[in-house]
Amino acid sequence: MSSQNEGSIVALVQSVLGEDAGKAALDALAIDPALLAQSGPTVSRAAFAMAMNVILFHDLLERVPSGAAYVADTLARGGRVMFDHGALRTIRFADGPTGALPAGEDAFTRIFLPLGYRMAALYPLDRLKMTGRAYVHVDAPEAIPQFFLSELHVDRFDPEFGEAATRIFGTSRDPLDAPTIALLDRYAAGEPVGFDDAATALPVIVSAFDRQHEPPAFADYELLLSRSNEAAWIATEGNAFNHATDRVPDVAALADRLKAEDRPMKPKLEISATGRVRQTAFRADSVERLFADRDLRTVPGSFYEFISRDIDPDTGRLDLAFDTGNATGIFAMTSAKA
C-alpha cells in the first residue's frame, strides 16, 4: 500500500485496521487538518505518532463498552472526540529490566522520544507508590495526544509483594523486533522513513501497548491487590491503555448530563491546584481474564475519561499540564475494591 494518493495518517491507520474499521476510527476523532494533509513517499514522525494514537484509541473503545457507547452518542449528536491523552502503567524494579522488557517507562520512552515526544513534567504519585510523567509532542503539542506514563515502584513495597511481582512481571517478553527498533533509530536520527517501512513497523509498535507477561497466578494477583490496586491492574491488563481522554469545553456540564443519563460516572470532578484543568471519568468496565490456574475471573478493565483545559495566562496557550491530585483521584477508577 502507498500513501501517494491519500494522506499518510489515513493510509497507515487503514493498513492496520482495514478500510472500514480504519475509516470509523478516523471519523470518530477531530484530527488537525494539517496533519491529515501530510502525504507522499515518506512518513513524518508526527503523522506516524498520530496514526498510532488513532489505532490505540480504537483499541481502547473495543475494550471499554461504556466509552464506545459515549463516542457513538457523540457522533450521533454531530460531534467528534478531541483525543487529549492516553495513559499507561509500567512496572519498575529496583534494579534491572522487567523480564525481557526495558525497565519501567524505558519500555515506552524508546518509542515516544524517536517519534517526537518530550517529557513535559514529572508528577510524584507518592500515595500510590508511583511516579507519573507527561509526554507531549514537540511538533504539534495541542493536536497530537499526550501520554501520561506512570511507573509503579516495586521496591517501595514489602519483600512478599516484590516476590509476587517478580513471578508475574519477570515473564515479560519484548514485542519490539530488530527492524522496528531500527526504524525508531531512523526517526531519532531525523532520517526519512518510507511509507512501507512505517506501515510494517506500526502494528509491531502498537503491540507494545498490551500485556507482555504470562497470566498471573490468582494467589499472586490477590497478594498484589491487597497492597496496590494499580499493581493488580497491571497484572491482568499489562501496558494497555489504562484510559483515553476526551478534551471537552465544559466537563462539569457534560458530567451533569451523563449522570442524568445514568452513565457510570465518577461521583465528583477532579480540579487541579491552578483550577485550569478539570477531569472526571466513567468507572472502569469489568472484563474477564484468564489466570494461570485456567480460571476465568472478572476484574477491572480500562476506562474512558473527560478533561477540560483552560488557557494558561502566563503563556496564552492551552494549559496542557496534569495534576498529582487529579491523577491520584482518576486512578481510583480501576480499583477492584471500589
Image (cartoon, rainbow, N blue to C red):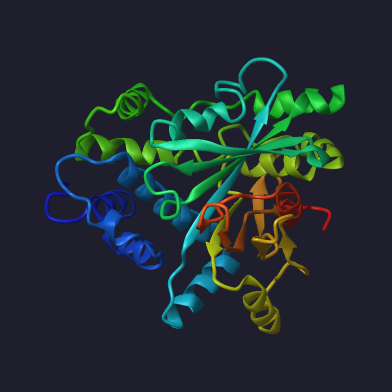
**Is 120 on the left or on the right of 264, as rendered?**
left
Front residue of 212 and 256: 256
**Is 13 on the left or on the right of 132, as rendered?**
left
Question: Which residue is located at x 32 percent, y 35 percent?
Answer: 201
Horizontal and vertical percent position of residue 264: 70, 71
Horizontal and vertical percent position of residue 40: 15, 46
Q: Residue furthest left?
A: 5
Residue 274 against residue 255 in the figure, above or below? above
From the image, which quarter does the C terminus lie in? bottom right
Horizontal and vertical percent position of residue 1: 17, 46
Question: Which residue is located at x 79 percent, y 23 percent?
Answer: 155
Is residue 278 visible in the rendered image? The answer is yes
**Number of numbered discs present?**
0
Question: Which residue is located at x 58 percent, y 47 percent?
Answer: 87
Residue 48 against residue 102 in the figure, above or below? below
Residue 205 against residue 163 in the figure, above or below? below
